[in-house]
Amino acid sequence: MEVTINSLTDCDREVEISLSPEELVPHFEQAYKKATPSIEIKGFRKGKAPLSLIKKMYGDSIEYDALDDIANDSFKKTIIEERKIQPIGTPNLVDMKYKRGEPFTFKIKYEVKPDFELKEYKGIEVEKKVKRITDKEVEAEVDRLRHINASYEEAKKVDGTEFMITADLQDLDETGTPLIGKKSEGMKIYLNEPDTEKEIKKALADAELGGTYTAKFTHQHGDHSHDVHLQITVKKIEKVILPEFNDEFVKKITKEKYSSSTDFRKAIEEDLRRYWNEQTESQFVNDLTREIVRRHEFAVPESLVNSFIDSYIEDAKNQQPNKKLPKNFDEEKYRESLRPTAIWQAKWALIREQILKQEKIEVSDAEIQTMAEAESAKLGIDKERLVQYYKSSDTALERIINEKLIELLKKSAVVKEVENTDIPNAV
């Protein structure tokens, strides 16, 4: 057997393998043995015809049909078993030459993990955006809870900002003529909602039941805008009655988990702090890993990139009621939009693998015991059952390994804390 491996790119390989007629004999004999039971030749019972006659009548067909299996078996033996090369993705048979009685030559393309130098991943300086919780943000959350539990009282006229208006909205052209097909009925407009256009609020400031009002404004959509001319017909007016934030209110909405508004306010503050700490930590880890990836320039196997894209597509399908993408969904365009993220994920996966080897990060039995003990009470599952599950679950072991890796990277990073001004001040 002659084997020649050519490097096409950092990730792409092409192997050319040639088998002599003598080396093909055992493969063909196996193919004849497999095919014989199903062959019918006149004058003989099914599967009982002489091998010489089978070879004469069906030899070409049987041997040609066996070539794909021979190529696959030879590739597995020479590349995977003998040379210990682990292809990524599915190898492709790209060329095949065979004439009965002569050598069989074929080419297979496959991908491998790129060989790259592991660069800095410790001691990296990263900004950590810290969110400070203020009294204003706590008050905003209190107001949100009050609005969720508000009651409504019908009114004939607007007198203030705490009003909910139900109205029909009709789009008008520049001359004030209604645009056909541009009417929305029964729309809710809360006058104290920050996102409500100020021109609408102004038009409805003294609105009366049954009244018709107009509002003109420019509506901004991301990086573009368009002019809006609305006719608003008031169908219903409701005064929003906000409950007082007191002990009685707290007992009601928490089902008496808290009995003091002061204690509940402190709990709200702690929840906000916990939430933003989690967001901060998540963003910090993202920024840290992105910085590590940025320092590594190498090509990634296309099959690895596609595997990540496939997983994103599968996630998108699972979010649909029937587990299928919408009928007119442009999957190809969506796949292309996912490529930058998939390439990043592929690079991080390869870098991560190298770091794990470099740091010899593994999961010990003691760590599994500790994790099972910590989660046993939370999950209400016997500790020993959890231990057995963690030991047998690749997903669980992978989670522990990843937590150890991230902890190592975080501890070694040079952290510069800055005030987080990118996130809103209210939840």
Image (spheres, rainbow, N blue to C red):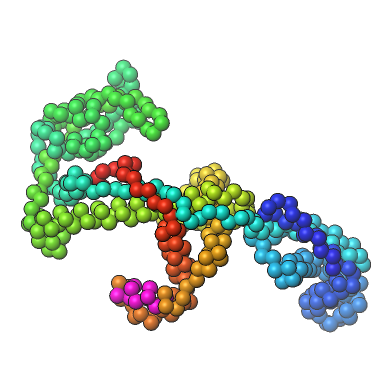
Please name the residue shown 28% across and 29% down the image: 170
Q: Is residue 176 left or right of residue 92?
A: left
Q: Is residue 158 left or right of residue 7?
A: left
Residue 168's place in the image compared with 411, above or below, is: above
Please name the residue shown 39% across and 80% down the image: 385
Q: Is residue 218 left or right of residue 45?
A: left
Q: Is residue 373 magenta?
A: yes
Q: Tell me the chief SS of the magenta region.
A: helix
Span of residues in magenta:
368-377
Locate residue 292, reporting x and y percent: 50, 52
Please name the residue shown 18% across and 46% down the image: 135
Quarter of the rendering containing residue 102: bottom right
Locate residue 166, reporting x and y percent: 20, 37
Q: Which quadrant of the figure contains the N terminus?
A: bottom right
- Count of numbered circles in the view: 0
Residue 409's place in the image compared with 192, above or below, is: below
Locate residue 117, reporting x and y percent: 61, 55
Q: Is residue 378 magenta?
A: no
Residue 303's place in the image compared with 225, above or below, is: below
Please name the residue shown 84% across and 82% down the image: 48
- Visible residue check, residue 394: no
Residue in front for this viewpoint, 77 or 277: 277
Residue in front for this viewpoint, 303 or 300: 300
- Visible residue check, residue 139: yes
Residue 271's place in the image compared with 31, above or below, is: above
Quarter of the rendering containing residue 157: top left
Q: Is residue 270 left or right of residue 285?
A: left
Locate residue 8, reporting x and y percent: 73, 52
